[in-house]
């Protein structure tokens, strides 16, 4: 089998990013804010912001003085963190697997100092939103963008784009994981970094705590390239810095970004020629070498003198990144397959009904080879929904809620179709109390999410009556209640049970009787329960013997007249 060739698309992505005038518009807004700020006050460590409204978008620009940003961002040696457990701004990013992360304290302080002045309603604007900033202003822009994601609906609104110029890193590995794990969030961030700017690099040596997220557009006089892998970005931020320890003033670098934005379109259209690797070089390595050449890491006169370690490390990380992207869980990719397996179960249910037994008892009794064939469909469906539930739980609140809403209908149908079969397996093994001791977590979560969804008052309507013949029982644990009722009947009729155990069984049977009648009254249980071969009818026959023919209740009145079974199935009871 031919091995799949890997490529790195950093150059193509960079060309795509710089071809429109988005970078130019973002930098123009920052420059305008810089001019207004420099005319009004002396350089300080505070952050300024302003909203601009060009014809095709809305821009919110944040500005800080680069030199002050460099010193302020470092705080107490760069280790000045604020944990997510101590503030409420970004708690929605926390998950069960990633319960806590930390943010650079100076960046968070600047953000909180203007938070209540920021325009929270900008997402309601129909125009695309660009959030931009330089130096620590870029850090504030990133935090503001994150705050908007809490209530952002990617299905109905245009996602915001955050463009930073020379911004320092703002968070630890926990923050990186919270953002980088979801492509829709990570794609909202583009960080432009010049090889002459010390500010984006001031925190990368702080015990390896600070981690990047989003896409980084690394640029030099030769050109630019995009990188997404966090470890590669850290390595290249170190390797590409062309400044010297004695020349650390970042203020002059402010103009470098303006020059870069101004000249980059010309460089994309009229590409500078760089000697390419030999033809025998693997495609991935060739791509990496050309990317490194674009950001100034390949000597123009001696292109083969590039540091092999950087190539090897970058190649390794690019392979890991490609593999992680392939393994990302996407429910929609398996949706058609899931639908096929559900269709198989629907057919199995119909065949069992035609045999007057119902699919629950057909599977429970294993009376036909098709009862064994259905196990394959069950396993495939269960693996899919277990993975989806786990993924929804691991995701931050906003993304997890969106996932649950999108797939709730399918998950509810799956639960109502498949859980009865798992219940049959459970009681066939002689076990008891499925609901409290044997119910899998993913069923509990699917039911919980359905109950949390607003729905109309539960009075039987014409639609429910008309469709009752084809419904799945609303309570997917119905058959567990039936099995427990059968066990209670045995406790009453068998020997060896104490009076206390018998009284407990009587109480359980009364509760089940009221429960079953309540479902029937609301047309919430499938008419299959009235088939002569069903476990429910077996329970009724045993219960009727125990209570005697003179016993009268709402359920007994219904059950003693077999004509009611057909009336229920047609919605006319």
Image: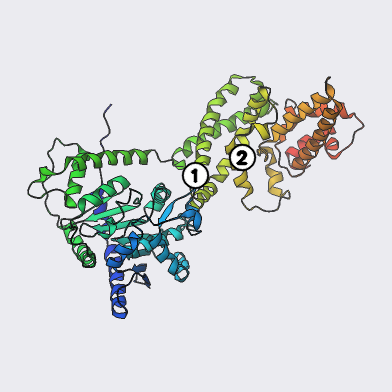
User: Closer to the camera, 335 or 263?
Assistant: 263
**Which quadrant would residue 333 be assigned to in this image?**
top left
| Residue at image coords 50%, 37% | 387
Q: Where's residue 200, x and y in %?
A: 28, 57
Label 2's element?
Answer: helix
Residue 19 in sight: no
**Is 291 drawn above or below residue 353 in the view shown?**
below
**Which quadrant would residue 551 be assigned to in this image?**
top right
Label 1's element?
Answer: helix
> Horizontally, is 102 left or right of 373 in the view?
left
Q: Where's residue 66, x and y in %?
A: 28, 66
For disc 1, the marked residue is 394
Q: Residue furthest right?
A: 550
Whole-angstrom CA distance, mark 1 to mark 2, is: 16 Å
Binning the other alpha carbons within 10 Å of mark 1 as few (below 14), some (14 to 19) or many (20 upward) gives some
User: Which of pointers 1 and 2 lies earlier in the amino acid sequence?
Assistant: 1
Q: Quadrant of the C terminus?
A: top right
Q: Quadrant of the N terminus?
A: top left
Q: Where's residue 73, x and y in %?
A: 34, 61
For disc 2, the marked residue is 444
User: Closer to the camera, 177 or 475?
Assistant: 177
Q: Residue furthest bottom?
A: 40
């Amino acid at each position: 089998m031919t091995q799949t060739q890997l490529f790195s698309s950093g150059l193509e992505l960079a060309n795509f990013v710089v071809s429109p005038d988005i970078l130019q518009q973002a930098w123009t807004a920052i420059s305008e804010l810089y001019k207004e700020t420099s005319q009004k006050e002396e350089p300080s460590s505070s952050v300024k912001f302003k909203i601009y409204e060009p014809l095709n978008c809305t821009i919110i620009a944040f500005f800080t003085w680069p030199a002050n940003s460099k010193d302020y961002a470092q705080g107490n040696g760069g280790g000045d963190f604020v944990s997510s457990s101590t503030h409420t701004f970004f708690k929605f990013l926390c998950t069960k697997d990633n319960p806590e992360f930390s943010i650079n304290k100076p960046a968070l302080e600047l953000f909180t100092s203007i938070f209540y002045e920021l325009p929270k309603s900008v997402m309601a604007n129909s125009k695309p939103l660009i959030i931009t900033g330089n130096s620590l202003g870029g850090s504030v822009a990133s935090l503001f963008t994150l705050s908007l994601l809490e209530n952002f609906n990617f299905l109905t609104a245009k996602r915001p784009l955050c463009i930073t110029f020379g911004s320092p890193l703002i968070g630890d590995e926990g923050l990186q994981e919270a953002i980088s794990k979801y492509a829709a969030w990570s794609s909202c961030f583009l960080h432009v970094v010049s090889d002459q700017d010390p500010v984006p690099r001031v925190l990368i040596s702080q015990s390896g705590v600070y981690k990047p997220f989003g896409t980084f557009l690394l640029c030099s006089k030769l050109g630019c390239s995009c990188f997404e892998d966090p470890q590669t970005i850290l390595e290249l931020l170190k390797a590409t810095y062309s400044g010297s320890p004695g020349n650390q003033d970042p203020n002059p670098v402010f103009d470098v970004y303006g020059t870069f934005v101004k000249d980059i379109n010309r460089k994309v259209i009229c590409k500078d020629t760089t000697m390419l690797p030999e033809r025998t070089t693997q495609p991935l390595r060739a791509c990496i070498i050309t990317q490194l050449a674009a950001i100034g890491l390949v000597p123009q006169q001696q292109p083969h003198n590039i540091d092999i370690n950087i190539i090897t490390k970058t190649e390794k990380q690019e392979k890991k990144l490609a593999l992680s992207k392939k393994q990302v869980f996407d429910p929609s990719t398996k949706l058609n397959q899931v639908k096929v397996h559900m269709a198989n179960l629907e057919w199995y249910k119909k065949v069992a009904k035609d045999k007057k037994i119902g699919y629950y008892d057909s599977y429970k009794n294993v009376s036909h080879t098709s009862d064994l064939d259905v196990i394959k469909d069950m396993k495939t469906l269960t693996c899919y929904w277990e993975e989806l539930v786990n993924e929804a739980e691991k995701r931050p609140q906003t993304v997890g809620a969106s996932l649950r809403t999108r797939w709730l209908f399918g998950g509810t149908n799956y639960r109502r179709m498949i859980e009865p079969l798992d219940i049959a397996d459970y009681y066939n093994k002689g076990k008891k109390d499925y609901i409290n001791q044997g119910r899998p977590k993913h069923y509990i979560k699917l039911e919980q999410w359905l109950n949390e969804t607003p729905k109309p008052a539960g009075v039987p309507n014409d639609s429910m009556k008309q469709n009752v013949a084809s419904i799945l029982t609303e309570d997917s644990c119905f058959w567990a209640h039936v099995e427990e009722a059968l066990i209670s009947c045995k406790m009453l009729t068998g020997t060896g049970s104490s009076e206390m155990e018998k009284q407990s069984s009587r109480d359980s049977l009364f509760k089940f009787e009221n429960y079953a009648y309540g479902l029937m009254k609301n047309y919430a249980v499938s008419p299959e329960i009235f088939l002569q071969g069903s476990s429910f009818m077996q329970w009724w026959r045993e219960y009727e013997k125990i209570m005697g023919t003179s016993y009268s209740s709402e359920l007994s009145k219904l059950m003693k007249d077999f004509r009611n079974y057909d009336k229920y199935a047609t919605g006319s009871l």
